[in-house]
Amino acid sequence: VKTRKGARAGQYLALLAYLVFLAFPFLWLISTAFKPARELASLHPTWIPRSPTLANFRQAFDEQPLLRAALNSLLAALGAAVVAVLIATPMAYVMARHRTLLAKAATGWVVVSQAFPFVLVIIPLFLVLKNLRLIDSLTGLIMVYVVWALPFALWMLVGYVRAVPAELEEAAAVDGAGRVRTLVSVTAPLLAPGIVATALFAFISAWNEFFFALVLLKTPEKQTLPVVLTHFIGAEGVADLGPLAAAATLATLPSLVVFAIIQKRITGGMLAGAVKS
Amino acid sequence: MTLASATRRPATRTPDAGGRRRPVDHGAWFLVLPALIPILVLSVGPLLYGIGLAFTDAQSGRTAPTRWIGALNFQDLLHDTLFWDSFRIGLLWAVGVTVPQFLLALGLALLLDQDLRFRPLARALAIIPWAMPEVVVGIMWRLVYNPDAGILNETLRDLGLGDGHDWLSGLGTALPAVIVVGVWAGMPQTTVALLAGLQNTPRELHEAAAMDGAGAWRRFLTVTWPALRPVALAITALNFIWNFNSFALVYVLTNGGPGGRTRLPMLFAYEEAFRYGQFGYAAAMGCVMVAVISMLLAIRLAGRLKGDEDV
């Protein structure tokens, strides 16, 4: 479809406006992170710090146990991603290949849990985990994250399994490969990229998660990064802006890196396939 | 070998019929159980448990046993004006975020679907907010809205539009300010879903319509929109629910203030449960929230579907 020159220019302008709207808060966060306290107190803030400094980063690590929190977040996110993928892949396989009642119920649960009311779940979860002595523990949090990541993981993985032609598995069976052998040497390698993408997605959602961590972790040494970040904001809502910005910038980097890796899959085929089916 | 494959093939060629004929597939159960148990224990179970709690006087840290109290919590809730204030704010917030979110995301998705230069870069940049922790999004916008060191007031001052405001503490500005952040944070996800929908619209029809001299707006209405509608409906409904249930953003931005002007129902229920320890009462709030939202969505979606039949 040919578009007139004026219209094209308008499109570029509109796209630029969108990108400015989406990017400016992040740029401002980075800018604030490198500003010395004196500059933050002055009334005319600038986009580019007049005398950039790393002092905020040092101060952030002094004020809050950021390293400890980052380690906790990393453990929670890695644990959630690995376990979620390990248990979701076999289930997704059954959901994609068999039309049993169970598969239908599972699909129903995936849809309903997209709209899951956290308020209704968090109190019972708190009580259940308390009985299992898993409150205020990373293990408990990981278990919650796994279940919380499952709907989306299943949804993605079912799409990936469907993309592997069943004929390939049948051909392997014809050649005398047993069921396990077929799954391991034919299906799994074809699924691998999808499994990795799903794991990374689960990693990001766990790394970013706040509500469950806030409710379930009480000891400061056990808390994850998002919870510790909120400690920079005082009871009166007053915050030391520099260290706050520095810590927030650091906390975002891992998600951004992981997101960059799976970005193509997200804007490309992943959701398109899911929508089609 | 050839004989074996010849006899095997017909059975496997129609997996549907074959799957149904097999009575119980033990292998399938073995594959499903590792995921099924956590789902039952930590998702389905707690949900039912939560509904049950709403009919009890459960409190945190109490030694006396919990009793069934019937619908007493719901009766109290009916007269709890603070809760209904919060509920009203929650609806305002959910609609206020979902509608602009959809319109802006639709515009962006249509642009990103065009054959523009830098498209891959633009797509990558456009979904960055999706990758950020909600807490960081809240912190970021606190810095933008900061009355002295914030860029918003500085820009207003530069443009000669007054001295700026304390956006997040002003009684009139807090909710709108928070809504802008909500729109910003949810836009990428909506855009990606709509983009996926756009990729399913028939290109040939588009080109044919253009040949017939249909303008851009007409092409959108007659070709793009009908194909996009199911995706648009689904993502809007989901956004509405997600927004109504959102917590972290507003917790970080205002913590419900000033004077409860941004106290979303989730914040209200959280305080009731984990600050005052009223588990039963908070669970009842959860039930009411779910019930009202499902009702609203059911009415809305039923209306849309009926509209479909009329066309």
Image (tube, grey):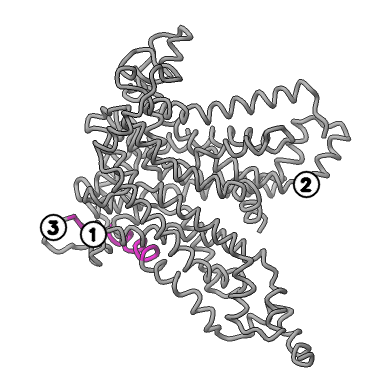
For marks 1 and 2 on the same chain, the one whose residue lies earlier in the sequence: 1
Q: Where is residue B215 drawn, in percent x and y?
A: 80, 29
Chain letter of disc 2 in the image: B
Residue at 49 percent of width and 79 percent of height: B30
Mark 2 — residue?
B202
Amino acid type, callout 2:
Pro
Discs 1 and 2 carry the same chain letter? yes
- For label 2, the crowd category at 10 Å Cα-Cα, with few meaning under 14, some 14 to 19 and many 20 or more, is few
Judged by its main secondary structure, the magenta piece is helix
- Compare marks 1 and 3 and give the one earlier in the sequence: 1
Q: Which residue carries the number 3 mark?
A: B62
Please state the chain letter of the residue tagged with numbered disc 1 in the rendered image: B
Q: For the residue labelled by badge 3, is the local secondary structure a helix, a strand or a loop?
A: loop
Amino acid at dot 1? Thr
Q: Nearer the viewer, residue B19 or B300?
A: B19
The magenta segment: B42-60
- In three-dimensional space, the C-alpha distance between marks 1 and 3, rounded to whole angstroms, equals 13 Å
Q: Which of the 4 image quadrants contains residue A194?
A: bottom right
Report how far apart the C-alphas of labels 1 and 2 lie in the structure.
55 Å
Quarter holding the C terminus of chain A is bottom right
The mark lying in front, picked from 1 and 2, is 2
